[in-house]
Amino acid sequence: MTEIAGGNPSTNSRPFSPIEWRTATLYGDLWPRYDDPLFWQSVDLFSQRWLANGEDPNFFRGKRCLDIGCGGGRYSFAMALMGAENVVGVDLSRAGLNDAQRRCEAKHLSHVRFVHGSALNLPLPENEFDFVCCSGVLHHTLSVEKGLREIYRVLKPGGSTYLLLYGSGGLFWPLNSLLRTFATLIGERALSATIDYIGSAPNKRRVFLDDVFVPILETYSLERVAQLLREVGFSSWREWSTARMDHEEDASALIAEMEDRSRLWQMGAIHSSDPTKSTIQFHCANICRNVIAAARDLEEQHRAGRITEEQLRLTLIGEGHHRVIARKEYPEISAI
């Protein structure tokens, strides 16, 4: 298994694509901003979701695990703390990996290692891991299909993977797609300065800048996710349905998230010294306000009994995030 003996993350000699480098640069600035309390709170989210969805609390004991697109290492640490024997985290961003290594050493987690590499070309041997975590990664790559094939390749027969892909439908991602177009005219530096001005927490900074500046952002229907899993070779999987804990939780949470983003655009417009950028950000704030008004009207329609809870959810949130556990089956043994 490719890993490091200690110190800095090991080097991957395989070249990255320009999009991968841009993605690495973006995330490399976001993860190190988490202070320790906020970071370890984000680590706990994995175990909370794991248990809330009825998974075995002792599952990770003695397992060899891989965290693809590990960022600052939060899920790597979560699996280690839940009993994994050995954990390897892989990420494009050396800055993120260095931050993960720093936290790893502070917690004396000697069974966690980090590797510099791509989800689409893992510098790891096949049939190596009992469990692979790939959360919120492949929808930011050039090929979700290739990423899934890599997961399948490195999994041992009988091993399983946790996969998170953004779901399609609803208002949030179409709104975000529209705002991404305007964000390119504003620039990451200007929006980052606005976030500093209003004092947003590092996790809010990460989510917002991720959504509007990551080079690739795709969404998938559940039918498409199922097809992708089948094409790679996974024959059995299940989707988590509880402990969403973010803007996909319910209509109110989604509206609150959109209101936060509307305020950010508004503050950017007010405090920008560039008249053109100020005007563009006013447009973005107005777009958000119009979508929020429509969402609130739909909430009222639901309260009046004119549309169902399911209709409200599908219209506002869509499918939400797809969180899937898929298993790599043992190969069939031909009869002699």
Image (cartoon, rainbow, N blue to C red):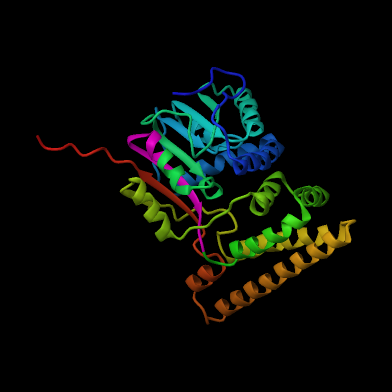
- Image location (x, y in percent) of residue 144: 47, 48
Numbered circles on residues, count? 0
Front residue of 147 and 258: 147
Q: Is residue 89 magenta?
A: no
Q: Quadrant of the N terminus?
A: top left
Residue 111's x, y, as percent?
A: 50, 23
Q: Does residue 233 appear left or right of residue 115 in this picture? A: left
Instruction: Determine whether, in the image, residue 186 is placed left or right of residue 128.
Output: right
| Residue occupying image coordinates x 53% and y 50% | 139
Find the magenta span and give its range: 151-168
Residue 238 appearing in the image: yes
Where residue 167 appears, as percent x and y from the top left, is 50, 58
Q: Nearer the viewer, residue 252 or 221?
A: 221
Nearest the eye: 112 or 304: 112
Residue in the picture at 67% in, 70% down: 292
Residue 77 seen: no
- Relative vertical location of residue 116 with respect to residue 226 in this rendering, above or below: above
Q: Nearer the viewer, residue 88 or 251?
A: 88
In the picture, the quarter occupied by the C terminus is: top left
**Which residue is pictured at 44% across the width and 48% down the height?**
145
The image quadrant that residue 212 belongs to is bottom right
Q: Could you tell me which residue is drawn at 63 percent across and 77 percent down?
A: 297
User: How far across and how far down the image is residue 157, in percent?
Assistant: 31, 35
Outermost residue to the right: 273
The kind of secondary structure the magenta stretch mainly shows is: strand
